[in-house]
Image: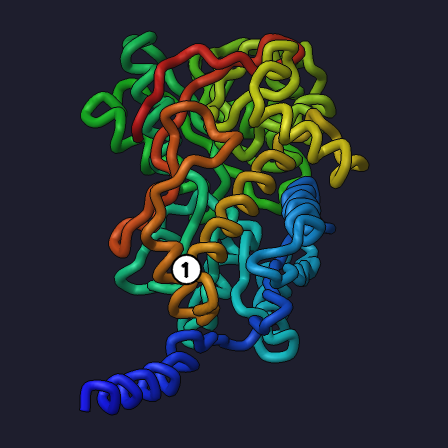
């Protein structure tokens, strides 16, 4: 009798085994491939940020050369938006409906990501680690399929405000910002962090449109305000233009620049390195250009990857390390998914992260939860010395 029961149990186990080993796939995932979509400005006024997607593609190539993820190779489909939000919508539809990607990853720009967000959430396709600091992109209650990567613009502005309050409490502040949601996000974060002192400390604000040919009128008005602190909340070519122009105007305030505009190769070189000396920005990534960096295994690994997989890119372009960090984080999410490569499981794993990413500075971890879609929330401050960025602060939270 006992032997008979044992045979029955063995048969039941054999019948159940295939169910335990079953693989779950949504479009974009197979036994051999994981297809990932991306919308990036390879051309247009934000084209400098196209380097991020190229770096991400290079990182995925390295992963593929190492055998992929559980034997599955990454198929990275990156399309050029031409810096147009309208084009980004068209491309998101194409990636989901025609290319059948599992998810869209690392798409660039506030306006583009806001534009495609309703569609991605309606279709329940992950819009993961979007490359924009816009605070409203962290809204899991309303848009549970959309997640950012870097600290929000409000967090970054608050960190600069804290530094000003502690080190220059009698500052007269001038602010230049884009007349869009992201620019206003920076401005709001600054006002909130300064609190009841914002009315007296901020002496002049000016905005610009992304089609303005130059910033001369705004910068002249800001200088004439008598400000001795300049919050230069510009991105792309406007950062280069503003840095160059205020120096040529013989205006030398304490200047702050967004993390998105810190690339030496993309933005400071064209402005003139001498004209950028003393600028302060936020830091989340380890340095890789100094002699000391060669003693850091993570920095050395990044440099080895650059030489082998991203050799045509400039080592002085910080957009490469951003793409490297974001791609590494996505790979960790996909590893956690195992053989359950469904869109729902991708989001489940992405919203339960607590990990260290090699090129992030000590103390900064990628942490998320179902109610907190901001993977990175802390930063350091650094100052440009004419050749490199030099970290000078302790870790600061927004």
The residue shown at (59%, 63%) is 36
Provide residue 257's location: percent of width, then percent of height: 51, 25
Provide residue 41's location: percent of width, then percent of height: 66, 51
Quarter of the image for the N terminus: give it.
bottom left
* Residue 41, visible in the rendered structure: no
The residue shown at (39%, 55%) is 350
Q: Nearer the viewer, residue 286 or 138?
A: 286
Provide residue 95's location: percent of width, then percent of height: 61, 71
Q: Quadrant of residue 24?
A: bottom left
Q: Give the residue at the far right of this rendering.
A: 312
Left/right placement of residue 82 relative to residue 219 reads: right
Above or below for 163 versus 32: above
The residue shown at (48%, 30%) is 360
Left/right placement of residue 161 relative to residue 389 reads: left
Q: Nearer the viewer, residue 112 or 378?
A: 378
Left/right placement of residue 89 relative to residue 79 reads: left
Number of numbered labels in the structure image:
1
As helix, strand or loop, the secondary structure at mark 1 comes to strand
Q: Residues within 10 Å of mark 1 (few under 14, many from 20)?
A: many
Q: Quadrant of residue 349?
A: bottom left
Above or below for 348 versus 169: below
Quarter of the image for the C terminus: give it.
top left
Above or below for 242 versus 248: below
Q: Nearer the viewer, residue 154 or 326?
A: 326
The residue shown at (62%, 58%) is 39
Which residue does the numbered mark 1 point to in the structure image? 146
């Amino acid at each position: 009798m006992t032997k008979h029961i044992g045979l029955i149990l063995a048969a039941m186990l054999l019948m159940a085994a295939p169910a335990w080993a079953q693989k779950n796939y949504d479009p974009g995932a197979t036994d051999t491939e994981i297809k990932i979509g991306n919308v990036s400005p390879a051309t247009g006024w934000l084209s400098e940020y196209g380097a991020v997607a190229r770096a991400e593609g290079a990182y995925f190539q390295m992963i593929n050369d190492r055998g992929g993820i559980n034997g599955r190779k990454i198929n990275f489909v990156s399309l050029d938006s031409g810096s147009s939000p309208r084009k980004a919508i068209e491309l998101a539809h194409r990636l989901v409906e025609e290319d059948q990607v599992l998810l869209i990853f690392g798409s660039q720009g506030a306006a583009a990501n806001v534009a495609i967000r309703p569609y991605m959430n309606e279709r329940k396709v992950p819009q993961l680690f979007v490359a924009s600091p816009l605070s409203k992109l962290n809204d899991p209650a309303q848009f549970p399929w959309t997640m950012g990567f870097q600290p929000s613009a409000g967090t970054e502005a608050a960190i600069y405000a804290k530094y000003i309050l502690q080190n220059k409490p009698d500052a007269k502040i001038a602010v230049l910002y884009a007349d869009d949601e992201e620019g206003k996000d920076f401005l709001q974060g600054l006002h909130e962090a300064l609190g009841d002192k914002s009315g007296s400390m901020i002496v002049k604000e000016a905005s610009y449109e992304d089609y303005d040919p130059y910033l001369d009128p705004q910068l002249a008005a800001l200088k004439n305000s008598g400000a001795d602190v300049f919050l230069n909340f510009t991105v792309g070519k406007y950062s280069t233009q503003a840095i160059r122009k205020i120096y040529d105007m013989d205006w030398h305030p304490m200047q702050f620049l967004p993390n998105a505009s810190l690339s030496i190769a993309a933005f400071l070189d064209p402005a003139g390195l001498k004209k950028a000396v003393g600028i302060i920005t936020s830091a989340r990534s380890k340095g890789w250009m100094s002699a000391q960096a060669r003693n850091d295994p993570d920095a050395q690994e990044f440099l080895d990857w650059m030489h082998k997989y991203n050799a045509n890119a400039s080592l002085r372009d910080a957009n490469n390390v951003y793409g490297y960090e974001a791609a590494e984080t996505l790979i960790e999410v996909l590893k956690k998914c195992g053989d359950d490569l469904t869109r729902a499981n991708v989001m489940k794993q992405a919203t339960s992260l607590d990990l260290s990413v090699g090129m992030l500075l000590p103390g900064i971890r990628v942490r998320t939860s179902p109610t907190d879609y901001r993977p990175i929330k802390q930063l350091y401050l650094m100052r440009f010395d004419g050749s490199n960025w030099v970290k000078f602060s302790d870790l600061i939270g927004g």
